[in-house]
Amino acid sequence: QVQLVESGGGSVQAGGSLRLSCAASGYSFSSGCVAWFRQAPGKEREGVARIYPGDSSTYYAEFVKGRFTLSQDNAKNTVYLQMNSLKPEDTAIYYCAAPRFQWVCGAGASRLFSREYSYWGQGTQVTVSS
């Protein structure tokens, strides 16, 4: 059974930083891909970033490029999302997700459709105040 657990959310002022963690059991981050999505109140869930060691690719949505950075610790089977220069519009619940089928990982780094991801964490709240 796959379980993803996010942590690291919180409240910061604009310009601040947070590091989110996504720890997995039943799913190997060293061979599969993992993505981060976020959902703000009243808005649709949107893809933020994705990492896939299988082809050494990382992808960042344009609105976080240059500010957010993905990394992973295979020994801990954990993926991190370092978020710097946070803006009020980054306020959302952040989810990590992993696909059930491997083809999703190989379909393209910029492909971030939440419907293709079967395993989800519980989410962690990020609040950025101005």
Image: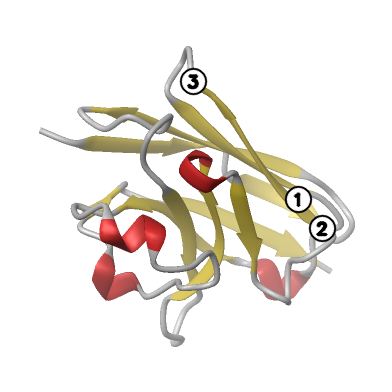
Give the mark, 2 or 1, whose residue is nearer the N terminus. Answer: 1
Badge 3: residue crowd in 10 Å (few <14, some 14–19, many ≥20): few
List the residue tagged with mark 2: 67
Left or right side of 69 for 48: left
Q: Quadrant of residue 68?
A: bottom right
Q: Which residue is mark 3?
A: 74
Q: Specify the farthest residue to the left.
A: 1
Secondary structure of the residue carrying tag 1 is strand
What's the amino acid at mark 2? Arg
Residue 79 higher or lower than 70, as above or below: above
For the residues labelled 2 and 1, the Cα–Cα distance comes to 15 Å
Categorize mark 1 by other alpha carbons within 10 Å: few (<14), some (14-19), many (20+). some
**Of the residues tagged 3 and 1, which is closer to the observer?**
3
Give percent across and percent down for residue 89.
70, 76
Q: Are marks 3 and 1 in contact (CB under 8 Å)?
A: no
Q: Position of residue 2 (x, y in %)?
A: 18, 36
**Whole-number angstrom distance, CA of label 2 to CA of label 3:** 23 Å
Q: Mark 2 against mark 3, which lies toward the viewer?
A: 3
Q: Position of residue 102 (x, y in %)?
A: 26, 52
Q: Who comes first in sequence, dot 2 or dot 3?
A: 2
Q: Amino acid at mark 1?
A: Val
Residue lying at 28% horizontally and 60% vertically, measured from the top left: 103
Name the front one of labels 2 and 1.
2
Depth check, front residue: 42 or 4: 4
Q: Image point 22% across, 35% down: which residue?
A: 3
User: Could you tell me which residue is drawn at 32 percent across and 29 percent down?
Assistant: 28
Q: Amino acid at mark 3?
A: Asn
Q: Which residue is mark 1?
A: 12
Q: Which residue is depicted at the point 61% across and 45% down?
A: 10
Quarter the C terminus occupies: bottom right
Mark 2, other Cα within 10 Å: few <14 / some 14–19 / many ≥20: some
